[in-house]
Amino acid sequence: MTQLDWYIRNELRPRHLRLLVALDELRHIGKVAAHINVTQPAVSKMLGEMEKGLDLKLFERTPKGVTPTLYGECLIRHARRLLNDFSQARDELKGLLDGDTGRIRVGVLSNVVPALLPRSVALLKQRAPRTNVLLREGTMERLLPQLLQGELDLIVGRLAEKHALPELGGKVLSQEPVVLIARPGHPLARRKRLEWADIMHCPWVLPSSEGLLHEPLERTFEQHGFPMPADFVEALSVQFVLTYLQETDAIATMTRDIAHHYRRQGLVSVLPFNFPKLMRPLGITWNRNRTMSPSTTLLIECLEEAAASGTPA
């Protein structure tokens, strides 16, 4: 057994893992010492002991602070995963003691929050009332690293081809077309049919370049011989889109499921315009390298059932 094997198996402790993560986040020994309420020499001593035990240099010291080496980055990445596993084990054990059935951490894209997620979580709560769900909304670029690091159990949204990784599993829920929306009473809402030329003179709310719809929409404009609109704002927030449409004659894109959800509330009109297929299927993404809890499996069943039920008219 090498010194590296021996140290990791026998000497590495959760306090070492927490120190590594704190050093990575704060990048300064003095700030870490204040954060964990110990002295700077104590932090330096613990880090020195780790480096001696592993026989590896984990951080470069500079007058401005510390920077992880290649070895440090590797160990920090695994430290985060292990600490997340410890937290999940604590939560599950506490849930068993309290009579709960679990806790699920779900990353969601904004385009699935208004309709599919509430229906799915309502089904889950009917079947497992004491199962807790933590939702984190964001872009795929922000959520995917959290899934890979074990900070999320699932992501619900659309996974572009550029995000396909061998360690990711996935399942299709539905294929929702994209529609065009505007405020109720918008002049275009009174038309029976719209062509491309009819919509080009309008101000637009375009999907943010961080979102998955921006590039397909840009290609669609090009295919029909039109440039992207000149009068536009870009937004990722559904709430901003809804409010902005009420204040202007702008038009925007939205998936049909979400658009009809807001149409039933009297917030938007769905315009009589047919978009070609733009979006990849809506689905669930998980990390194959992590064991899925029974609570997570149950939520997936509820998501599938909610998606299969479709959108009420």
Image (tube, rainbow, N blue to C red):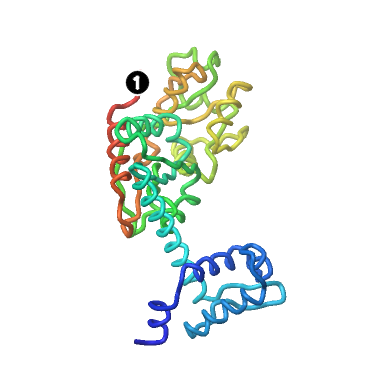
Residue pictured at 44% horizontal, 25% vertical: 259
Q: Position of residue 279 (x, y in %)?
A: 39, 39
The answer to which of 301 and 98 lies nearer the viewer is 98
Q: Position of residue 143 (x, y in %)?
A: 47, 50
Residue 73, above or below 104: below
The answer to which of 254 and 222 lies nearer the viewer is 254
The answer to which of 56 and 131 lies nearer the viewer is 131
Residue 132, above or below 70: above
Q: Position of residue 253 (x, y in %)?
A: 48, 31
The answer to which of 219 and 158 lies nearer the viewer is 158
Left or right, residue 50 beside residue 28: left
Task: Say what secondary structure mark 1 lies in.
Answer: loop
Amino acid type of disc 1?
Pro
Quarter of the image with the N terminus in it: bottom left
Neighbourhood count class around disc 1 (C-alpha, 10 Å): few under 14, some 14–19, many 20 upward: few
Left or right, residue 63 beside residue 134: right
Residue pictured at 54% horizontal, 41% vertical: 208
Residue pictured at 42% horizontal, 46% vertical: 105
Left or right, residue 69 beside residue 275: right
Residue pictured at 57% horizontal, 66% vertical: 24
Residue 80, above or below 110: below
Left or right, residue 245 beside residue 305: right
Count of numbered circles on the image: 1
Q: To which quarter of the image does residue 216 belong?
A: top left
User: Which residue in the structure is indicated by mark 1?
Assistant: 312
